[in-house]
Amino acid sequence: MSLTPSKMVALGFKAPNFSLRDTEGNDITYSDSNASAKLVMFISNHCPYVKHLKLALSKLGRDYSDKSLDIFAINSNDVERYPDDAPDKMAEDKRQFNYPFPYLFDESQSVAKAYQAECTPDFFLFDAENKLVYRGQFDESRPGNDIPVTGEDLRSAIDDVLVGKSPSNEQKPSIGCNIKWRS
C-alpha cells in the first residue's frame, strides 16, 4: 500500500459522463441523474482507509436518501493483482455494509482516469450543472488516529450544495491507498 493524497482537481471541473455496471448487473449512467448534487467516490474493498469509512459511507447514503443527492461508488482497481476487489467481492461488500447506493466496477479504469482519481477513498461532489464543487477528505479521521469518523467535511459540502450555496474553497485532500493501475 502506498499512502497517496487525492489530486485536488480544479473546482469547476465538468463531470465526465460514464456508464458502468453495478454489483447487481445493472448499467448505471451518470448523465441519467437529475439530482441537485452528485457524489462520485472511488473506493475499494481492501484498502484500510476505505475499510475505516465503510459504515460511515453506508450511513451517509442512508442519511441523504430522501435528498436530491445521487451517489456513485466506483472501484477502479486492477482485480487481477488485487482479487479482493473483484466484482463478486464488491457485491459481498455492498451486502455486508448495506450500501444504499450503486457500487460500480470500472474495469477499463477509464472513469478513474477521466476523473483524475488517485486514491481510495477519493471524493468528487458536483452541483446540478455537473461542476465540481468539492474534492477532498471525508473528515480528519484516519485508521489509528483516534479521531471519530463523522464525515463532517463532505457532509458540510453536500449540505451547502443542497441549499444552493457553494462549499468553502478551503478543502483538504483525501488520503488513502493509491489506485491499483494495470501495468
Image (cartoon, rainbow, N blue to C red):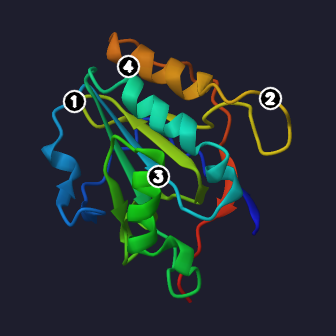
SS of the residue under disc 3: helix
Dot 2 alpha-carbon crowd within 10 angstroms: few under 14, some 14 to 19, many 20 or more: few
Q: Residue furthest right?
A: 145
Name the image quarter holding the N terminus.
Answer: bottom right
Rendered image: mark on residue 96: 3
Q: Amino acid at mark 3?
A: Gln
Q: Does residue 47 appear in the picture of this structure?
A: yes
Q: As drawn, is 95 to the left or to the right of 9?
A: left
**On the image, numbered disc 2 is attached to which residue?**
147
- The Cα atoms of the two marked residues, 2 and 1, are separated by 32 Å
Question: Compared with residue 132, is residue 117 higher up or lower down, i.e. above or below?
Answer: below
Q: Amino acid at mark 4?
A: Val
Q: Residue at x 40, y 23 (%)?
A: 63
Secondary structure category for the residue under label 4: helix
N-terminal-most mark, 2 or 1: 1
N-terminal of the pair, mark 4 or mark 1, is 1
Question: Marks 2 and 1: CB-CB under 8 Å?
Answer: no
Label 2 element class: loop
- The amino acid type of the residue labelled 2 equals Ile
Identify the mark nearer the N-term, 3 or 2.
3
Label 3 vs label 2: CA separation? Answer: 24 Å
How many C-alpha atoms fall within 10 Å of the one at disc 4: few (<14), some, or many (≥20)? many
Which amino acid, by three-letter code, is at mark 1?
Ala
Image position of 80 (left or right of 175): left
Residue linked to disc 4? 161
- SS assignment at label 1: loop
Indicate which disc residue 35 carries: 1
Query: Badge 1, how many Cα within 10 Å: few under 14, some, many 20+?
Result: some
At a point 68% along the width and 61% down the height, the residue shown is 177
User: Which numbered disc flags the more N-terminal residue, 2 or 4?
Assistant: 2
Mark 4–mark 1 Cα distance, whole angstroms, equals 11 Å
